[in-house]
Amino acid sequence: QQQVKQSPQSLIVQKGGISIINCAYENTAFDYFPWYQQFPGKGPALLIAIRPDVSEKKEGRFTISFNKSAKQFSLHIMDSQPGDSATYFCAARRYNFNKFYFGSGTKLNVKP
Amino acid sequence: DSGVTQTPKHLITATGQRVTLRCSPRSGDLSVYWYQQSLDQGLQFLIQYYNGEERAKGNILERFSAQQFPDLHSELNLSSLELGDSALYFCASSTGLAGANGELFFGEGSRLTVL
C-alpha cells in the first residue's frame, strides 16, 4: 500500500501565483518529512524538510505546513516562477527502518 | 552536482537479458539506496546498503539483486528482464544509516529500456 499519498498529480500556475501540493500519511512512526525537487533529466534534490514537532517551516519562497493530528503536510511555493517548473516529491522517513517513502510526485508547470 | 555518480546513463537491452547498474556514492557516505521510477510514477524503494551490509529492503523483485563493495560503490543487477522493468533507476546516498539530517543525495539515474 502507498505509505505517502500526494496530490495533485499535475499543477499549472501562473507566474507570481501560489503553488500548493498536498501529502498525507498514515504511519505515525514517521519522523521526518522532506520535499524533493526534480528537474527533467536530473535526480531529485532536497528542497526543504520538516520534523513533526514543528507546524511550519519557511525557506525563502518555499513553506511546509505540517498538521500532525490530520497526518497531512503541504508545500507552498509563493510567487511561483517559471524556473520552479519541475516535479515535486514529498517523502516520509521511518528512521528505525532506514526507509524513505516517497509520494507519487506532482508535475508543476509555471506559465510566464 | 550531488556527488553521486551512476553509470550507464542510458541502456537499451532485450527481454530476458541481464544488466548491471553501477553507483558511486558521495565521498564519505556509507549508505546507498536504490530506487525505481517508472514513467509518471513515484520513486519506489528497492533496497538499501550501509557500509557493505543490506539494511532495508523494499519492493525489490527476486530477479533483482544488489551489493555494496568494500570501496562503498554499489551495483544493482537486473536479470531475466521484462518489458515492465523499463524505468529510471536512481541511486542515492546519505551520510548515516537513515540520513544524518534526513537528506538523500541522488544521482542522475540510469535509464533502462527493455525491448
Image: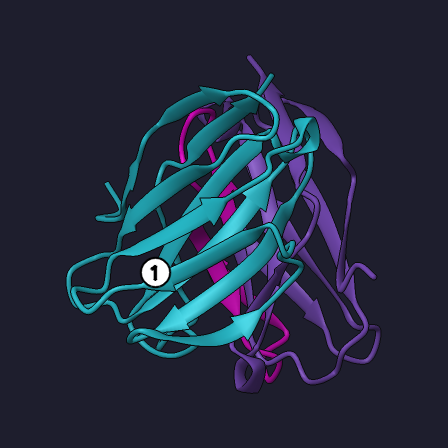
Chain colours: A purple, B cyan
A41 or A90: nearer the eye?
A41
Q: Residue at x 37, y 62 (%)?
A: B67
Does A37 appear in magenta? yes
Against A24, residue B109 (above or below) is above
Residue B37 occupies quadrant: top right
- Depth check: give the residue in front, B7 or A58: B7
Of residue A57 and residue B113, the one placed in the foreground of this image is B113
Q: Amino acid at mark 1?
A: Ser
Q: Position of residue B109 (x, y in %)?
A: 41, 37
Quarter containing the N terminus of chain B: top left
Task: Give the position of the C terminus of chain B as an image quadrant.
Answer: top right
Q: Is residue B38 left or right of residue B110?
A: right
- Characterize the local packing of mark 1: few (<14), some (14-19) or many (20 or more) Cα atoms within 10 angstroms: many
Q: Position of residue A53 (x, y in %)?
A: 60, 85
Figure quadrant of residue B93? bottom left
Q: Is residue A64 above or below residue B16?
A: below
Q: Is residue A5 above or below residue A104?
A: below
Magenta stretch holds residue A50 = yes
Find numbered disc 1 in the image and state the secondary structure of the residue it sits on. Answer: strand
Q: Can residue B37 be seen by looking at this rendering? A: yes
Q: Chain of mark 1?
A: B
Q: Position of residue A14 (x, y in %)?
A: 65, 20
Whether residue A59 is visible to the viewer of this picture, yes or no, is no
Query: What's the magenta region?
Result: A36-61
Query: Which residue corresponds to the image point at 28% horizontal and 76% vertical from the top-left?
Result: B51
Compare residues A65 and A2 and report the one nearer the observer: A2
Residue topped by disc 1: B93
User: For the point 63% across and 51% down, which residue is it?
Assistant: B44
